[in-house]
Amino acid sequence: MNYHEEEILGKAYDSRLLNRLLTYLKPYWFPVVLGVVILLIVTLLDLAGPYLIKMAIDRNIVPKVTQGLLTIVLIYFAVLIVQFAFKYARTYIMQWIGQHIVFDIRMEIFRHLQKLSLSFFDKNPVGRLVTRVTTDVETLNEWFSAGIVSVFGDLFLLIGIIVIMLKVNWKLALITFSVMPLLAYFTFFIRKRIRSAYRDIRVRIARINAYLQENISGMTVVQIFNREKRNFKKFDELNKSHLEAHLRSVFYYSLFWPSIDLIESIALALIIWFGAMWKYGGAVTFGTLVLFIEYSKRFFRPISDLTDKYNILQSAMASSERIFLLLDHKPDITNPEQPIVLKKFNGEIEFKNVWFAYKNNEDGTPDYVIKDLSFRVRPGEKIAIVGATGAGKSSIINLLCRFYDVTQGEILLDGVDIKKMNAQDLRSYIGLVLQDVFLFAGTVEENIRLGNSDISIDIITQAAMDVNAHPFIDKMPEKYNEQMMERGASLSTGQKQLLAFARALAFNPNILILDEATSSVDTESEILIQQALKRLMTNRTSICIAHRLSTIQNCDRIIVMHKGKIREQGTHQQLLRLKGIYYKLYQLQFMDRKVQEEKFLAISV
């Protein structure tokens, strides 16, 4: 089963999950208690109505006595008014509790997601995680606001009706309860089928969402390869499948509610028949008969509500299990209990016998992408790392930023193992510019500052000028207050990279890392950026990863990677004189296509 079809429902009731859910009620114990008390009052008021009608009929209407009738009518009217006020309070408190708990759970999930390591996000699709924060949490909202506390109201009402019926006339009460086996059997029969239909609906909507997200994200490929009709046909099949599941649930619900009404009508007919027969014999008053008719209507309502709340509980158990599974996932990257704080960071980096693997082979052994890597970067030194795709260049950056932990060996900053440092402190020393620039929803200024109030607008403007981003920003209608479209869709790739450079400059890091950062910038902008980087790299440790070798020729040292190992080191001229891997890579950028392919195949062997 793939991750889109994870909606198979487990147990409808799980005490372990329920106990854990109840912990979210603890901060709101007073509103919960108040809600239960109000529910009890509403139940008592609901029970009082039919009894007042019985009193009016037996004491006033049947014997034709007007004295005291007005009093009963006024009391009945007062009960309705008070009941309205308490029902309003009950609804407001229940929704208030539900919304606050949903807020708390969403914040807990989001806070936890930010702590998780990148390895977790490598294995879990974005859509799946978004579902946890949205759909699953909203399901819990329904349970907290309309389920767990409201069920007390249904139970209070049900117990109250049973007690009063048995007290008033136990024989007629047993006649009313005689339809319960039929109701129980039918409810169980329908509930199983509705449960199956709900499960199918969620599975099918998950398939639709996954397919829709995939097609929208890949719309360029869809259109260029003329796949519109094929994709439409596939979507049509998924949509019809979803429709069929929905119609099946509609069918069972259409059968369920009329059946409840039918059983209720059977009970009512039995009450009228036996009540009338016993009234003629003097065993039942007319007021008692009316009381039983009124209570029979109220008797079946909480039973129907409890059936609905069972479905809500079932969905809540499934959603909570998925949410807690996410919350229980421990980060791979953890901070030490007593982290070392560098009082003054000079910028020395050292890799000592580092081995690293993202995953294991089929036999369980690590599939190493970095193999016994050792090198040292002196404070203020500018180094470049080059190599063919898959050589391990970006993995070095991931390890240095501690997005992943090394499998063996250690990485030192100023002689301190980065595992002994707080990860947030470590990353505060590093400025990282990636090839694939991510822009957040917000203004240009907000995307450069990233919430750091210490960075003034003057620093932002100067950083943008240094990387030649200011001219195109200045042409925008709102300039630095211009709102970005989703992921910066209104900007070119080069413009987004310029903003990323401005972001790195504004933060003024001790270590600057450029991972293919100039690959999508035009030649003119690249020249201006190189000038800015030359100033930025002064007295600052810098690491550049690039395929375009023309951008790294002025680095102090170039490290050539191949299949996870260092094969060559030296300056641009020294490596060219070696006529090794770097020489061949350099030649690839100045040869015709056929020769490039032959050289590339030779390097890859």
Image: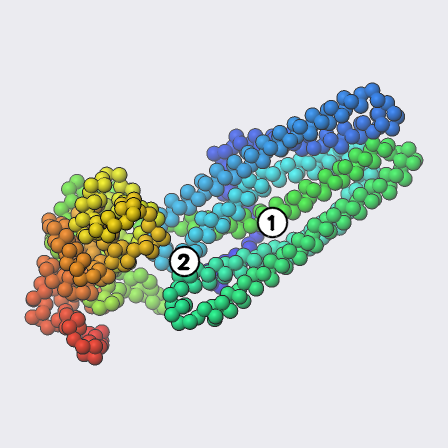
Q: Which residue is mark 1?
A: 311
- In screen coordinates, is 137 left or right of 345? right
Question: Residue at image x 58%, y 47%?
Answer: 312
Taking depth in this image into account, of 343 and 99 the one nearest to the observer is 99
For residue 281, the mark is none
Name the spot of residue 604 as percent of width and height, x first.
Answer: 22, 74
Taking depth in this image into account, of 420 and 448 the one nearest to the observer is 448
Would you call the spot at circle 1 few (<14 residues within 10 Å), some (14-19), or many (20 or more)?
some
Callout 2: SS:
loop
- In screen coordinates, is 494 left or right of 141? left
Work out which quarter of the rendered image holds the C terminus and state it: bottom left
Q: Earlier in the sequence, mark 2 or mark 1?
A: 2
Q: Which residue is mark 2?
A: 125
In the displayed orientation, state which residue is furthest to the right: 281
Three-letter amino acid code of the residue under disc 1 = Asn
Question: Residue at image x 48%, y 42%?
Answer: 102
Question: Residue at image x 67%, y 35%?
Answer: 156
On the question of residue 503 being in view, the answer is: no
Image-quadrant location for residue 192: bottom right
Question: Residue at image x 78%, y 30%?
Answer: 53
Q: Is residue 200 above or below residue 427?
A: below
Callout 1: SS:
helix
- In screen coordinates, is 437 left or right of 236? left
Name the spot of residue 413 as percent of width and height, x first.
Answer: 18, 49
Q: Is residue 363 above or below residue 314?
A: below
Taking depth in this image into account, of 543 and 395 the one nearest to the observer is 543
Would you call the spot at circle 2 few (<14 residues within 10 Å), some (14-19), or many (20 or more)?
few
Name the spot of residue 149 as percent of width and height, x first.
Answer: 58, 38
Q: CA distance from mark 2 to mark 1?
A: 28 Å
On the question of residue 497 being in view, the answer is: yes
Three-letter amino acid code of the residue under disc 2 = Pro
